[in-house]
Amino acid sequence: MNFVDKNVWITGASSGIGEALTYRFNSLGARVIISSRRESELQRVKNACKYPQKVEIVVLDLEKYHDIDNIVSPYLQQFGNIDILINNGGASQRALVVDEDLNVVERMINVNFMGAVALTKAILPSMIAQKSGHIVCMSSLAGKFGIPLRSGYAAAKHALHGFFETLRAENYDNGIRVLMVCPGYIRTNVAINALTADGSPQQTNDPGQEAGLDPDVLAQKIIKGIEKEKLEITASGGETNGIWVSRFFPRLFAKIIRNKK
């Protein structure tokens, strides 16, 4: 697939997977719109790109999803269309269900699910009109099964599958493809920034995260997944085997996962 001058919108682009994807698409000649809450970090990423003149910064807070349509509208007019939307922005958590504040669950749903839905709905009509488009949705192994300490996060990721798999079925004939990405541990700051029971960041890393897959390796896999029009990809280490164990040996999996705190 030729990505030259394709318009690619990436959320969560100020670090981790989103940052890696920005560099990859920019090096392939795409025009990249990068979003997150942190403008200074987005500027750092833009300056580090091979073709910074082909990078547009749009500050976006996914939690404030009611504002997204108005923010997106002028950029759709400017660029005419978005060829690839990558819903990568999000946040994680580390808290027991019994301890977590309800607003932490709400934030998990708003940031990880409603923000992606609002941005997608703002862009989808233009993709339908042009009869083409690719939507990439960053899920997780937690979108496949519940994991201790991640209840709200897992709920949001499960919801992504229901919404975007429905969108995929409805819009296949409109030339729109949807790729679900379900990684395990990736070497990012997601655990450090994860919300604890009262909504404050954990501020420490998890051993699995520290030993996780390099974000650039996942970025390459995502681009290949787009090129091959894959429906879903998984990536990381042996933890991805949990998908198959949970499907074929549910009682064994239930025993294993309850010890993963």
Image (tube, rainbow, N blue to C red):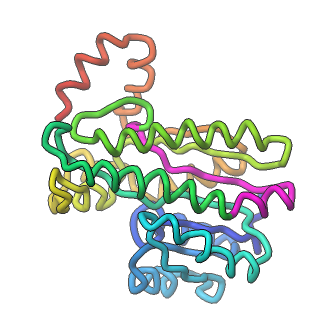
- Residue in the image at 66% along x and 64% along y: 122
| Image quadrant where one finds the C terminus | top left
Residue 24 as seen in the image, left or right of residue 4:
left
- On the image, the x and y values in percent for residue 23 come to 54, 72
The mark tally for this picture is: 0
Which picture quadrant has residue 204?
Answer: bottom left
Q: Residue 151 location in percent, x, y?
A: 29, 39
Which residue is at 39% across, 55% downward? 214
Placement of 82 over or under 133, stated as above or below: below
Residue that appears at 44% across and 42% down: 157
Q: Position of residue 207 (x, y in %)?
A: 19, 47
Of 248 and 145, the residue lying toward us: 145
**Residue 178 appears in the picture as rendered:** yes
Q: Tell me what residue is drawn at x 44 percent, y 31 percent.
A: 144
Q: Which residues are magenta?
A: 123-142
Vertical comparison of 12 with 121: above or below: below
- In depth, the one of 105 and 245 nearer the eye is 105
Residue nearest the observer in this picture, 39 or 218 = 39
181 magenta-colored: no
Residue 127 belongs to the span the image colors magenta = yes
Residue 183 visible at all: no
The N terminus lies in quadrant: bottom right
